[in-house]
Image (cartoon, rainbow, N blue to C red):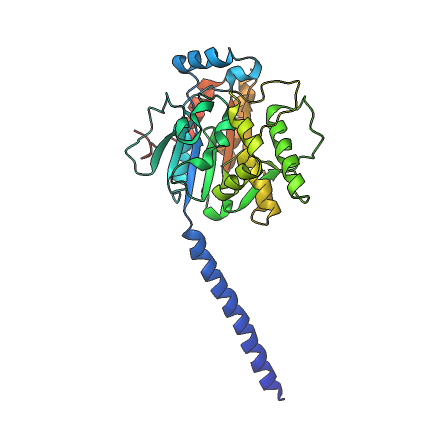
Amino acid sequence: MEKNTIILILIIFVLIILYNCSCSNLVQIPLLNNIKVDVVYTWVNGNDPLWKERKNKITGPPKGDSIFRYNSVDELKYSLRSVYKYAPWVNIIYIVVDDVQKPSFVNEDNPKIKIIKHSDIIPKEYLPTFNSVAIETCLHHIPGLQENFLYFNDDVFLGNNVSIDDLYNKCYYRNVKYTDLVPQDGEWMCNLKTDYLLLRNEYPDTKFIVPWHMAHFCKKSLMYELEEMFPENYTHTISQKLRKQRSDIICKSICLPCMQYNLGVVKGIYKMIPDKKSDSMGVELGDKDTSDAVKRLDLINKNKYKFFCINNSIHNDILSQFLEQYFPEKCPYEK
């Protein structure tokens, strides 16, 4: 075979490979862009005196850190602004609220906004509930919810442009080593460890996954599968009025949005992404050092993270000022 013929055959072979790769990419891009992704928020106005009175009658007055758990400075309003600005591609935004409350600043006339009451997704015999884990465990029951959705706490924000590809079928996780479950574990870690142990019995290759506190990408079908797989733990979780209520027992509660990551990873659906410090930041405003709180918020301003979370307990004025400066433009999701 002549040299020129061999070269020609090689060129044709390379062109065929390039063409196939190009076609493959052309197929994947529109498929991803055509996927509808909803947003789900859980919200409560913990400053409402009527809500406080109702809660205290059922659960008793708050103690320790739980005193600040329901503190609110209208974080939801600014989180909605962040979604409008940095993720305009989202589909419907569902806001899950207590039956006796709803955020006064939300524009319910906007076709992308839907208010969901606890009684829409949680059996009435378990209401009222003041347990965020119980509420999260029922999110997949939202009527009309898409298969793919992002779950936000109201203290989670987008700080820069975010694409579907940044989140679709991805699990951003912290590198936390598993240790044996003991009664002294905090409520959140206790739930995560229970998730892991239950799934490990079904899938020995299950990994211990601690997700980063950000916008969680969830799949409704995985949550339904888990509800059917562990009905006793599911019912136990939604029956708890508060998070882990006793420190002398090992809890049986599960955290379904987190648990579905474990199931998705072991099934090969989710891709695990180590937490990128350049893309996300969590801030705890829980101490009395005002200057330190300001420094941490300044880091968010400086670095423009894609995702950030601010857990606030006592610095209401500082946080309100920061959020108004970071998200000054009113959006169509609010009145």
Q: Residue furthest left?
A: 109
**Which residue occupies the foreground of this view, 35 or 331?**
35
Q: Is residue 278 at all visible to an observer of this figure? A: no
Residue located 52% across and 15% down the image: 67
Quarter of the image where the N terminus is located: bottom right
Q: Residue furthest right?
A: 180
Task: Give the total number of marks visible in the rendering.
Answer: 0
Residue located 50% across and 69% down the image: 19
**Which residue occupies the foreground of this view, 60 or 284?**
60
**From the viewer's perspective, is residue 276 above or below residue 55?**
below
Q: Residue furthest bottom?
A: 1
* The image quarter in which residue 205 lies: top right
Q: Position of residue 176 (x, y in %)?
A: 66, 35
**From the viewer's perspective, is residue 13 above or below residue 142?**
below
Quarter of the image where the C terminus is located: top left
Q: Position of residue 332 (x, y in %)?
A: 31, 35
Residue located 39% across and 39% down the image: 85
Q: Position of residue 45 (x, y in %)?
A: 41, 20
